[in-house]
Image (tube, rainbow, N blue to C red):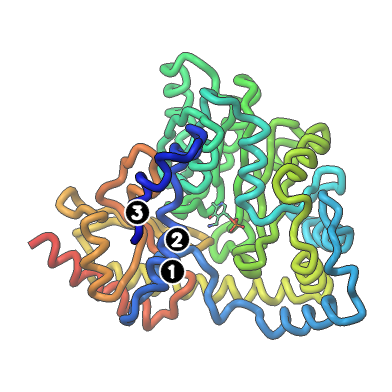
């Protein structure tokens, strides 16, 4: 006999933070979709194209670095990261907007751990944390897990509306402890923060004494437009900027390897915090990533990926134009994985989810990207993981589902 969750936890001496954890609608869609047996066009998860995962190169490098002559690849690693990966990563970043120095780098278990470490180090219960609206709610959920109070700052085509943010903070009557931003090809909107706003955000953070948590998994996947300096570069060594990066989108998310670039003054505290979480990041996979970088595979891989994603974005926009012209509007990202689609008030995208799934298409409803659920008639689609012909099919299915729920 099974018990409902409330009954089975009622007798447990749980911390209040356990029952306050909000979980992730985005991540839960992975298991939900795995249970479906019919054909589904998957616009829900933010995964790279399956055919773009460089499996052949990874298998070759993996065989070499994890072969029988490398028992040390299965030992504990240094908490700050395996030297082979740290060195390869420094070389990879040299000359880019994220160029850095060894004492600033910590290898993490994906971008999510970089966020967890940030909120753990900067946020006390009740502290004010700014998040974008919409935002990547796995990030805001992590801030909530450290009992932050969230303030949502609107996002438009130029990223977070920093003037509005200033007004909101004035109204709140206290300074934020941290500002969580995804400045480039934002998840979920796809928008990129302008240089003027980046500079203004840094000024405001200095005035308020707020940490800027600069989360940028997609910046290397620009397929249109001009490159933009990162907050890390513009901050020019300002200790308040803490950058979270990951190999999840540029190589593969299952690796769970990322890095944090932070002020060296934070170094030992980061190490202490990470040692209380997982001792070190998975060593065989750090070696695999290091070998992939050293083997020179990444650059070609990025060139191919950018071309694939541009084609897919255009396919998604063409299909949306065909089926939803005049009924919805959508964003025009210059890189990354996502488009944000906004319907009129007649479409409730949470109510649309089940009928759309029955039609054979999956997306993430807009409310999943706002702690206070501000986007009931928007949705996020990932164009990156689906081939153009299937993108057209998926949007046609979505249009049938929209017709059903609005009749
Ligand atoms: N930040 C953003 C904005 C993301 O989109 C993601 C992944 N969807 C992450 C962080 C987490 O990255 P990882 O999978 O490496 O933990």
Q: Position of residue 400 (x, y in %)?
A: 18, 72
Tell which quarter ligand 1 is in.
bottom right
* Residue under numbered circle 2: 338
Q: Which mark is residue 175?
A: none
Instruction: Judge the density around disc 2: few (<14), some (14-19), many (≥20) Cα neighbours within 10 Å.
Output: many
Q: In the depicted view, which residue is nearer to us: 97 or 380? A: 380
Q: Which residue is at a point 48% across and 53% down the rendered structure image?
A: 187
- Work out which quarter of the rendered image holds the C terminus and state it: bottom left
Q: In the depicted view, which residue is nearer to us: 81 or 375? A: 81
User: Of label 1 and label 2, which has the lower sequence position?
Assistant: 2
Q: Can you tell me whether the CB of the residue at mark 3 lies under 8 Å from the nearest atom of ligand 1? A: no
The residue most toward the front is 1
Label 2 SS: strand
Label 1 SS: loop
Q: Which residue is at a point 30% across and 52% down the rendered structure image?
A: 378
Q: In front of the other: label 3 or label 2? A: 3
The residue most toward the top is 173
Q: Position of residue 64 (x, y in %)?
A: 84, 81
- Work out which quarter of the rendered image holds the N terminus and state it: bottom left
Instruction: Judge the density around disc 3: few (<14), some (14-19), many (≥20) Cα neighbours within 10 Å.
Output: few
* Residue under numbered circle 3: 3
Marks 3/2: CA distance? 39 Å
Q: Disc 1 vs disc 2: Cβ atoms closer than 8 Å?
A: yes
Marks 1/2: CA distance? 6 Å
Q: Quadrant of residue 206?
A: top right
* Residue under numbered circle 1: 383
Q: Position of residue 326 (x, y in %)?
A: 20, 59
């Amino acid at each position: 006999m099974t018990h409902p969750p409330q009954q089975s936890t009622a007798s447990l001496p749980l911390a209040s933070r356990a029952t306050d954890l909000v979980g992730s609608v985005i991540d839960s869609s992975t298991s939900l979709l795995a249970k479906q047996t019919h054909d589904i066009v998957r616009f829900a998860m933010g995964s790279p194209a399956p055919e773009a995962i460089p499996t052949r190169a990874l298998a070759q490098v993996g065989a070499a670095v994890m072969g029988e002559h490398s028992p040390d690849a299965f030992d504990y690693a240094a908490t700050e990261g395996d030297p082979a990966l740290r060195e390869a990563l420094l070389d990879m970043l040299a000359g880019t907007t994220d160029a850095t120095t060894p004492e600033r780098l910590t290898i993490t278990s994906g971008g999510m751990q970089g966020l967890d470490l940030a909120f753990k180090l900067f946020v006390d219960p009740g502290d004010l944390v700014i998040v974008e609206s919409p935002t990547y709610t796995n990030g805001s959920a992590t801030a909530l897990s450290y009992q932050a109070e969230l303030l949502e700052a609107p996002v438009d085509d130029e990223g977070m509306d920093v003037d509005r943010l200033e007004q909101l903070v004035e109204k709140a009557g206290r300074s934020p402890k941290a500002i969580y931003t995804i400045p480039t090809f934002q998840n979920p909107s796809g928008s990129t923060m302008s240089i003027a706003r980046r500079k203004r955000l840094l000024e405001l953070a200095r005035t308020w004494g707020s940490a800027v948590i600069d989360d940028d998994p997609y910046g290397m996947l620009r397929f249109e437009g001009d490159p933009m300096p990162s907050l890390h570069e513009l901050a020019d060594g300002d200790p308040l900027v803490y950058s979270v990066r990951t190999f999840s989108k540029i190589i593969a998310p299952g690796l769970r390897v990322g890095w944090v670039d932070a002020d060296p003054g934070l170094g030992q505290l980061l190490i202490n915090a990470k040692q209380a979480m997982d001792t070190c990041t998975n060593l065989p996979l750090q070696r695999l990533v290091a070998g992939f970088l050293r083997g020179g595979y990444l650059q070609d891989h990025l060139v191919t990926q950018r071309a694939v994603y541009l084609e897919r974005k255009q396919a998604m926009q063409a299909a949306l134009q065909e089926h939803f012209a005049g009924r919805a509007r959508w964003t025009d990202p210059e890189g990354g994985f996502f488009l944000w689609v906004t319907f009129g008030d007649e479409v409730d995208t949470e109510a649309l989810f089940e009928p759309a799934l029955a039609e054979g298409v999956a997306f993430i409803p807009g409310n999943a990207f706002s702690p206070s659920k501000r986007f009931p008639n928007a949705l996020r689609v990932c164009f990156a993981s689906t081939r153009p012909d299937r993108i057209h099919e998926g949007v046609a299915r979505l249009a049938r589902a929209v017709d059903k729920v609005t009749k």
